[in-house]
Structures are given as C-alpha cells and as structure tokens.
Amino acid sequence: MQYQQTVRTVLGSVVSITTANSAGSGVVYDSHGDIVTNEHVVAKAQTVNIQGAVGNKSLTGKVIGTFAPDDLAVIRVEGSDSGLKAAKFANSDNAQVGEIVLAMGNPLGLTDTVTQGIISATGRMVGGDEPAGGKALITAAIQTSAAINPGNSGGALVTLGSEVIGIPTLAARLPGEAGAPAPGIGFAIPSNTVRDIANQIIKSGKVGNTGRGTLGITAQTAASESGNPAGVAVIGVASGSTAADAGVRKGDIIVGVNSHDVASVQQLESTLAVLKPGAMVTIRYTSDGSTVHKGSGRLDSLSSG
C-alpha cells in the first residue's frame, strides 16, 4: 500500500514536456506555475507544450531560465487556473544507499510511468564525457537501479515518503555496443542542487552562485599527431580571470591543474568540479608545444550570466 500511496501523492506533480525537437518530463516545483526539468529537454526552445498527469489538459509554458552545467531548466505556466500541483522536495543530503525509490515520468512517450529500484550510490560524478552526457557535469549525482529511459529525463526520483529526492537526467551506456543503455544504472540530479539552481532562476532568470569554479577560458580538446587527446587548447581568455592571472594566453595548451594531468576538456572540467571558487590553483601549460610553464591564480566562480 505504501507504493500506491506514494504514486497517488506524487504522480499528479509530474508532467510531460514536448518541444519541436525533444520530449521529456518535468516536476511541478511551486504553486506559482514553475516546473523544473532538464536543460537538455528544452534545449533552445523558448516555449514548450505541457501535458499534466493522468490526462489533464494541455498547457503552454515559457522557459524562464536554464543552467547547462547542472542540466536544469525552469518553465513557467502563466495563469492561476493551470491546476498544477507542486511536489514536495526532500533533503538529498539524507539519501541512503539501499533506500527504495520510484522513478516517475514519460519514458518512450509512455505517460505516467512508474518504475521501482533502490539508491545504488550517492556522490557520483557523471556527464560530460559520458555518452548522452551533453554539456552537463553532475558532481553529486544519485545512482539508482530504477529504470531510466529516454523520456524519463526531467521527471522525479521519489522516496517512499512521497518526496522528490532527485531529477533523473541520464542512464549509463555500455562501452563498445553503440551506446546501448546499461540496465539498472541511471543517474539523478540531487534535490538540493535542483532547489538551489531553480530558486536562483526563478528569482532572477539566471544562476549567479553555483559553487563551481572556472578558469575563465573558452577551449577545446587538443589532439596529438596520432589523434589522441593531448591537452586543452585555449581559444580565448577572459580579462582578469584565473587563467589570465596564471599567465595563460590564447593559443596555449593546458596540460595540468595542480597535481592532475589534463588531456581533454572533460578531464579539465572533472578536475575543477571538486574545487571551490576562491581556491588557489596552479595551471601547467605550454606555449610552444614543449616547455611547460606554471602559473597560479584563484579560481573564479562559474555563473550563467
């Protein structure tokens, strides 16, 4: 009976979201018509179509802000007669390995679908170089055995206390099998991250305090003569940024941060993800392809605008 009660309590807060190019799920965040979902579900869309749970009427929502690094977006439905019911969000710091959870969403277009599993691990770093990871790098993802399929993205990972503890964002993929999904390994953005980012977007339409550090560069992965990743080629450096203070210039190749070697943009992002803004970092880089220089600076804070 506890499963049924949880489904009855929460499923009405999970909606279907479609755009011209994608489809996924969303969770009603508050009583003002705000809905949280994945950034990759809305992508560049300015408005989306929303279908309420269990056959409720169709609505139109406006994308009021996105934050790609955490794969989150907020959509707003105007009007007080939307009939949307806000979900209750848990404290994800209390997530326990082995805890039973339910994933609610619209996988493969099958609306109002519920799957069951456990929290398999917490604190995972996923995205970026993961297949289907997109531009996001989730630094404290919740791993679950509940089935996560295309269309579940942006939906709800729910405790038996009827609280949303995470937003499903991607499933692991098997290596060497054309990206086939790995059964029983899905990942969700923790609810505390969702609330932090969503509250900032709702307040100002952007994210100013992310807790993430950045060097203040635009870059791409550099390749060696054999075609293997060989560092991070710097395309641009922001004035006054960490990289600028460390002496990094356009055209340089970053090969390490602190004691960590860096061969790709993904490795650089993973290294920075565990550091906080304001931390002193030492950047190792080459300007002529051979001599390695070192420079230091305090890590800048990443924001969405």
Image (cartoon, rainbow, N blue to C red):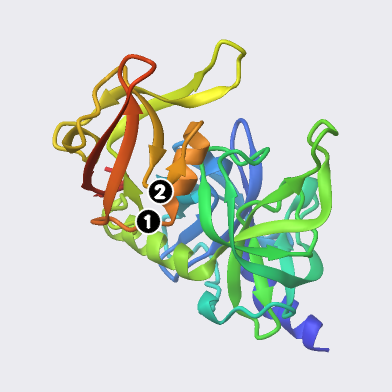
Mark 1 Cα-neighbour bin, 10 Å: few <14, some 14–19, many ≥20: some
- On the image, the x and y values in percent for residue 197 come to 39, 59
Q: In which quarter of the image is the C terminus?
A: top left
Local secondary structure at mark 1: loop
- On the image, the x and y values in percent for residue 79 come to 42, 59
- Provide the residue designation for mark 2: 272
Furthest residue in direction bottom, as rendered: 1
Q: In which quarter of the image is the N terminus?
A: bottom right
- Seen from the viewer's position, the closer of residues 279 and 44 is 279
Q: In this view, does 200 lie to the left or right of 232?
A: left
Q: Quadrant of residue 3?
A: bottom right
- On the image, the x and y values in percent for residue 55 come to 72, 59
Tell me, yes or no, if residue 89 can be seen here: no
Residue type marked 1: Leu
- Seen from the viewer's position, the closer of residues 97 and 298 is 298
Q: In this picture, is 36 found above or below 130? A: below
In the image, what residue occupies the spot 62% across and 60% down?
188
Q: Is residue 135 left or right of residue 2?
A: left
In the image, what residue occupies the spot 48% across and 67% down?
29
Mark 2 Cα-neighbour bin, 10 Å: few <14, some 14–19, many ≥20: some
Tell me, yes or no, if residue 38 can be seen here: yes
- On the image, the x and y values in percent for residue 49 come to 57, 44
Local secondary structure at mark 2: helix
Residue type marked 2: Leu
- Seen from the viewer's position, the closer of residues 193 and 151 is 193
Q: Quadrant of residue 181?
A: top right
In the image, what residue occupies the spot 32% across and 60% down?
200
- Provide the residue designation for mark 1: 275
Q: How many labels does the image show?
A: 2
